[in-house]
Image (cartoon, rainbow, N blue to C red):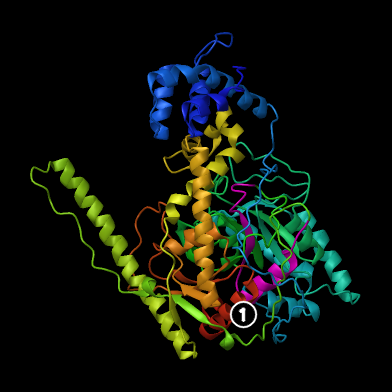
Amino acid sequence: MALDRRGFLAACSQTGIASALLPGVLYTLAAQAQETKMPAEPFHVTEEMLDHAAALAGVQLSADQKKMMLEGLEQQRESYEEIRKLKMPNSVAPAFVFDPLPPGAKLDTAKEEPRWSAAPSATVSANSEEIAFLSVREQAELLRTQKITALALTQMYLARLKRYDPKLHFNVTLTEDRAIAQAKAADAEIAAGKYRGPLHGIPWGAKDLLAVKGYPTTWGAGGFEMQVIDEDGTVVQRLDAAGAILVAKLTLGALAMGDHWFGGQTRNPWNPHQGSSGSSAGPASAVAAGCVAFAIGSETLGSISSPSTRCGDTGLRPTFGFVPRTGAMALSWTMDKLGPICRAVEDCAIVLNSIYGPDGQDLSVREAAFNWNADLDWKALRIGYFRSEFDPIPALKLPEPKPGETAEQKKHREERNAFRTAAYARRVYDQRFDLAAIEKLKSLGVNLIPVELPKLPYGAMTPLLTAEAAAAFDELTMTGRDKLLTMQGPGDWPNDFRVARFYPAVEYIQANRARTLAIRELSKVFEQVDVVVTPTNGDQLTATNLTGHPALILPNGLRGADAPKPPKVDDGDNDDIGGPGTPVSLTFLAGHYQDAKLCAFARAYQEATGFHKLHPKLD
């Protein structure tokens, strides 16, 4: 297997072959073929293998070109073996750093003291249920004035985590000893007049891709159940410094996909027959169930947005490059983002204020300011909306029977039509909430400016995510340990990682060049407006994750008794299937590093609607 690649690039240039797919395909084919051979049996690249690889790459090769390439391709494979011998951990990033800013963008680096809202007049209730669902801002005032202790609050949340986990399956590891020690220390400091700020004494939960010293960091994945990373992630360190109390490491779908993890499926507190969506499944479920005051989630392509929608939380996906990811599992170095999942917008601002800014380790993080001002005159902001996203939904057209249709074909068509009809009914029903949001904003005096999401092939850019993920978990695929992951379907990581090995390096670069166009075009929208209102789903979710723009997802009401019934099976593909009595959401977007303005406007809408004060009945 130790074959040298040194002549490959020269061979490619001589034959006019530019695609980098060929070596990746050949290596994978070779590795799979080698598994069926005796260790001592030699292996060679053949012209037939080259034909298959070239077909996948969309490259035409003559017989002479193939013969010329064989020796170089044999040599090419040696470098793969040498690099794999390095056994690079997930924490080693590539030698490039993604920057979402377009040319000419200017950052506000002057930091100011945060301006929190006026102290709420929260009182201690004998009903722990009421305390559990108070906002961070309300709990903080109770702790500051010593009307409640951090120890009592911590013990209450630990009890709730234990009580509701059998129903919702959101716990991976309780950090009870650590939490009790932190709570006692917080109470002593507060009593001594050493109040650190609004997170001092507040219990929180971490998505279990964040490393915490002394505890397993499982990434939600089979085969990693006992993994211990002997350090605290930067976000954990910063929340410790703010006085927050970590009570639990919460579930995520295996390697940050969906809500299925090695212990089962995390559930939606509003409808426990359904999953909580993912991949920040545990954080969203636990916050919605009143089992932590807030949680830290992550998003690469919807992993804060989707579970916040399903569970009725307020989720902030900050600008890419605002929060350091040091100590967090890497899935896609150019798309991963850490952010808070809370009950209220100002809670998100409070958390972000403590975790943002460079740490000297994550080189993607910029020296930008997050200047929170709860009293910002949001009426001075220019508010846009993606007009076409609020247009009437076109009538559904279903396939008609075809001449000569067999019984099997008829059955398949009817099943497909029934599925599409049900999905259409849910979409039409839910749009009324989006339209009601527009009317509510107008009633608040907002002059909505119509804008549009630039028309670009965003979906065609997303394979770059899977390519990075396949590199992050290269050893998992090559050793066959991917068989330990819980989900093994066509759309799950094991298969996605294998498919990604056939994604040409040239096309990866081309997708990133297209991404540059997307950044420039979408940034032009935020030259016209400060904030954009949009439905949560649709192309904007993919687009803004690619461009690194921030998003704030708000609960936007509950479906009524007249809502379409949910499907019998939750396939995890859509967040609109909840059925009667489940939440819907609305999303607000802003320009790069304009997260404070984004939060200020979203808070105004949230305070005017009050949907964040609703919570599920679990007993």
Taking the spot 47% from the left edge, 70% from the top edge, the residue there is 585
Percent position (x, y) of residue 151? 78, 67
Name the residue furthest front. Answer: 14
543 or 608: nearer the viewer:
543
Q: Is 388 left, or right, of 146 in this rendering?
A: left
Disc 1: which residue: 600
Q: Is residue 143 above or below residue 307?
A: below
184 or 227: nearer the viewer:
227
Q: How many marks?
A: 1
Residue 519 appears in the figure: yes
Taking the spot 64% from the left edge, 47% from the top edge, the residue there is 330
Where's the N terminus, which quadrant? top right
- Give the magenta range: 330-359
Percent position (x, y) of residue 400? 14, 54
* Amino acid residing under circle 1: Ala
* Residue 417 is one of the magenta-drawn residues: no
Q: Is residue 324 above or below residue 344?
A: above
Name the residue furthest right. Answer: 192
Secondary structure of residue under mark 1: helix
Label 1 environment density (alpha carbons within 10 Å; few <14, some 14–19, many ≥20): many
Q: Is residue 176 above or below residue 217?
A: below
Percent position (x, y) of residue 315? 58, 67
Q: Is residue 249 above or below residue 138?
A: above
Name the residue furthest left. Answer: 403
Q: Is 360 left, or right, of 499 in this rendering?
A: right
Taking the spot 51% from the left edge, 12% from the top edge, the residue there is 37
Percent position (x, y) of residue 371? 71, 76
